[in-house]
Amino acid sequence: MYPIHDHDPLLLLATALAAKRRPAELPEIMAAIDLIQGNIPNEEKLSEAFVRLGQNGLLLALDGGVALTPAAESQIEALPRKGEMADRLSALRSLLAAYTTAGDAEAVAIPAEQLRAAMLAHRAAAAGGGKNLLVPKPKPEAAKARPGQRQRKPLPKQRKR
């Protein structure tokens, strides 16, 4: 797949995170992009990335959502399981650079207006009181002592005789 744009691996990884057992809806993809990158790119650039990835046979539109093709799933499975998201994005970028398309597939055309509505729905859900399950767990700042490993009482001072 040539050329690789900045938003292509981001969108592919976000769709993989959001679409586990069923096609991902747009607000779920926006939440995954927010989790990976911390901010959501411009809706026109995302719309172009949807079209590019659809034409290259990596995404397809199903049941009002977006799903990965088997070729895209094999790319995602080749990524390292553990590691930071930036490392996974750079590994996915190199996998996409080596990927060759079999032919022209059907483009996933999502208008910018739908993407903007999904972004606003995601922001409204994030501002609400509900718990977002896609947010990573906070890591403790200091190492906790293991349970059962308490300190002993100090021995009393020896008296001089």
Image (spheres, rainbow, N blue to C red):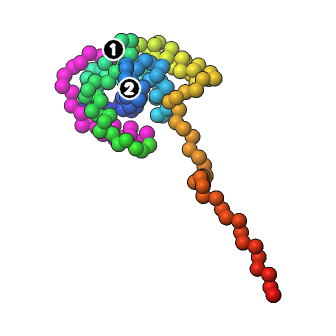
- Say which of 100 and 143 sits in front: 143
106 lies left or right of 122: left
- Say which of 73 and 93 sits in front: 73
For image coordinates 41% across by 13% down, the residue present is 111
Q: Please, which residue is most extreme toward the front here?
A: 161
Disc 2/disc 1 C-alpha distance (Å): 14 Å
For residue 4, the mark is none
Q: Which residue is mark 2?
A: 20
Q: Start and end of the magenta stretch? A: 85-108
Tell me if mark 2 has few (under 14), some (14-19) or many (20+) residues whose alpha carbon lies within 10 angstroms of its own.
Answer: few
Q: Relative to residue 51, is residue 159 depicted above or below?
A: below
Q: Nearer the viewer, mark 2 or mark 1?
A: 2
For image coordinates 49% across by 26% down, the residue present is 31
For image coordinates 32% across by 24% down, the residue present is 68
Which percent across, then down, holds residue 109?
Answer: 35, 14
Q: Quadrant of the C terminus?
A: bottom right
Q: Are marks 2 and 1 in contact (CB under 8 Å)?
A: no
Which percent across, then down, holds residue 14?
Answer: 41, 29
Please identify the quarter of the rendering in which residue 19 is found.
top left
Give the amino acid type for the residue marked by disc 2 in the picture.
Lys
- Say which of 132 and 6 sits in front: 132
Secondary structure under tag 2 reads loop
Q: Which residue is mark 1?
A: 62
Give the amino acid type for the residue marked by disc 1 in the picture.
Leu
Please identify the quarter of the rendering in which residue 158 is found.
bottom right
In the rendered image, residue 16 lying in the magenta stretch gets the answer no
63 lies left or right of 154: left
Which percent across, then down, holds residue 123?
Answer: 56, 22
Q: Relative to residue 157, is residue 41 depicted above or below?
A: above
Q: Is residue 15 visible?
A: no
